[in-house]
Every structure is written in C-alpha cells, then in structure tokens.
Image (cartoon, rainbow, N blue to C red):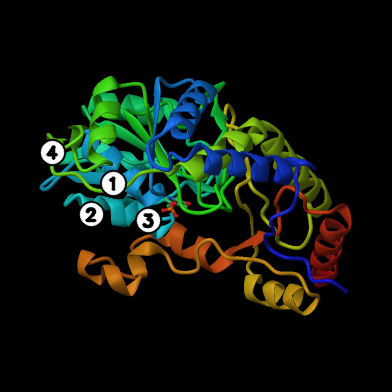
Amino acid sequence: MEPVPYFAFRDYPAGSEAAVQEALLQAVAGKAYILGKELRTFEEAYANYLGATAAVGVGNGYDALVLALKAVGVGGGDEVVLPVHTFIATLNAVLQVGAKPVLVEPDGQTYNITAVTAAPAITSKTKALLPVHLYGQVCEMAPLLELAQAHNLKVVEDAAQAHGATYINQHAGTFGAAAAFSFYPTKNLGALGDAGAVVTSDDAVADFVRMYRNYGEVQKYQSEVVGVNSRLDELQAAVLQVKLQHLDQLNAERQRLAAIYDSELEGTGDIILPYTAPGCSHVYHIFSIRTKRRDALRQWLREQGIYTAIHYPVPVHLQPAYKFLGYRTGDFPVAEELAQTSLSLPLFPGLRAVEQERVVGAVKHFFR
Ligand SMILES: *Cc1c(COP(=O)(O)O)cnc(C)c1O
C-alpha cells in the first residue's frame, strides 16, 4: 500500500498547478526580477484581502518578524513577551533585534497565549507582546489588545501559520501594529521557495520595512538607515498572486478535513482533539491531537505506512542553543506536557478520502 504522507504538494484545486506555471512563465518573460510589478501587485492584493493598508514583501517569515519588531521600535534593553510553545523563529527574531525574550505558557486548551498567561510576565521594561496564532487558530485578541493598551505595549503578531484565519470577522495579521507572515512552501499560503511579508496599517511601519528590506534606501543609492537585503522576488510574488486567489478554498478544504477527523476520532482512547475558542476561526495549518500514548501511537501509524509530525518535540526553553536564557525543565509545565503528548496528523489540501480513512482506521485500531 502507498504510504500516507504527512504533507504533499498536490494539484488542489485542480488546475492551480498549471496556473502557477503559467504565472511563472509570464514573470520570467517580464524580465524584471526584483522589486517589480509582480511584487507590487501581490502586496496590494494581500493587504486588500486581509483588510490592512500595506503588505511589504520580504525574504522569509523570520525576516518579517525581525523587520516588524524593528519597525515598531523594539531593540536593545526592551523585553518582549512571547509564547514558549512556538516555532524557534519567533524567539530568534526577538534575540536578533537585541531584545530580551520573556517566555510565557500557552493556554491548555487553545495552545495560544492569552491575556491571563501573558499578564504576569509584563514588567516596566516590556515593550511588545508577540502573540503567535499557532497551528492556524487566531489568539483571543480582544483581551490581549486590552492588556497591551493598559501597559502601553506594541503588539506584533506572528501570523506565519494563520493566513486567512479570523477572530470576530477580522483577519489574523490586522490586530497589532505589525504582523509577520511566512510563505514557506508548506504554509497555508505558500510560495515555491522562501518568502514572507510584514503587514500593517501604519504608514510609518510600512515605509520603514520598505526601506530596511532594501539596504535602507529611500531611493537608488540614498540610504537613510543601515538596512539589509531581504526582498520577496518577482517569481515568488507571481506564484503567490495565483495561490492567494485560492486561499479561502484551500483553508475551507483544511477545515473540511479537520471536521472529519473531529467527528471520527471523538471519544477515541484518551485523544484530545483541537479546541477552537469562541470567536476564533482555525485554518488548521497543523491538526494536532494529544494522547498520553503519543510515541506508541506514532510508531504504530508509521508501521501502517502513515507519517505524522510533532509540533514541537522540544520546547524552545529546553533547546541547547537557548541555555543562556536560564530556563529549566519544570519552568513551563503546560508547554512541556504538550511536547510530550502532541501528534500532528496528515492534513493538507488534496489529501484523499481513502488516505484520511486509513489514518482514522489506524488510530481507532490502536486504541481498540
Ligand atoms: C514558519 C514559521 C516562521 C518562520 O517562517 P520562515 O519563512 O520559515 O522563516 C515563524 N513563525 C512561525 C510560527 C512559523 O510557523
């Protein structure tokens, strides 16, 4: 039997692969490969889609985080409050701008930080809150924004897993002073290589990022700040224009597949299914379940030819690279338990019904 991959690139919706190839050929024929019309068109379309005034394309999601933090004024001596349960890029970006990361626990149900978990970490040095819309579910933003306002903090969203997700009818990436998106190929909106964007409705933030991504230039050979080279190239922008047209459909397909897992796996063994908070929407970048028998279940699925993933097997505070931050085992019991019990099942647009049935059948069989 063919293995069931954890993720695969499939032609979904049918014909989109050909449309992407067509757009690429046109961009090649356009012969303007950096900071040209394809990028401007995509930036405008993505900002419009989200309901923000600007999207500024950069080289990847990590750079988007770094530039967003810099653009809102986070730097040396500042503290930034962010989740311990996230991908390493979020933490690296804070360190990259010279700020001190202050990690906080996720909520035990949504796995996102909340005003309740973030509040105790705020000090007189806190400059920004950096919520991550993890797995594709938007954080409960109203209380987080209130908390930020009460302490005069900037909010920078890590929306790298939440393209198109909403909280009370507003898109992820439009709540804070700035937001970072990644268009890494496997993300809900993915390029055919590295790409990212900073999204904002603050003109000063957008102008800063436009300058900073291109050697600090305001015009050719006139640099106002010491910038970097982090540009989203024309070929990726052309691909993203096509993919953006399908984003809602791609997310709807992810939600349909998630609903099948939910109804099929409810009550199976000790499985805890993803929980979506009221007002939040979930676009299932990752479909993560929990079970105390995670490692055995993963092994069993592997033997049935079913591939899974773990997000994330080692919490960031226990990674060897970050020992110098001084955290220890036991500091974040919720995140540490998630690292031991979480298992991500195959879920991607184009996953076939027979494949999903095999996953469901194998999981049920394991717990029988
Ligand atoms: C993917 C991701 C990033 C980084 O994006 P890259 O484009 O790979 O640099 C940052 N934060 C989160 C939560 C992510 O999932």
Q: Quadrant of the C terminus?
A: bottom right
Q: Name the quarter where the N terminus is drawn.
A: bottom right
Which residue is at a point 35% across and 44% down the rendered structure image?
A: 231
3 or 1: tag closer to the N-terminus:
1
Name the residue beneath numbered marker 2. Answer: 96
Q: Is residue 218 visible?
A: yes
Residue type, mark 3 in image = Ala
Q: Position of residue 178 (x, y in %)?
A: 34, 31
Tell me the CA gap for discs 3 and 2. 10 Å
Q: Earlier in the sequence, mark 3 or mark 2?
A: 3
**Which residue is the site of mark 4?**
225
Quote the CA–CA distance across marks 4 and 2. Answer: 17 Å
Q: Check disc 3 and report the residue beneath it.
A: 89
Residue at x 24% of width, y 23% of height:
204
Some atom of ligand 1 lies within 8 Å of the CB belonging to the residue at label 3: yes
The first of marks 4 and 2 along the sequence is: 2
Give the residue number, with chain letter if any, for mark 1: 66
Q: CA distance from mark 3 to mark 4?
A: 24 Å
Give the class, few, some or many, for how many residues have Cα within 10 Å of label 1's Cα (few <14, many ≥20).
many
Secondary structure beneath label 2 = helix
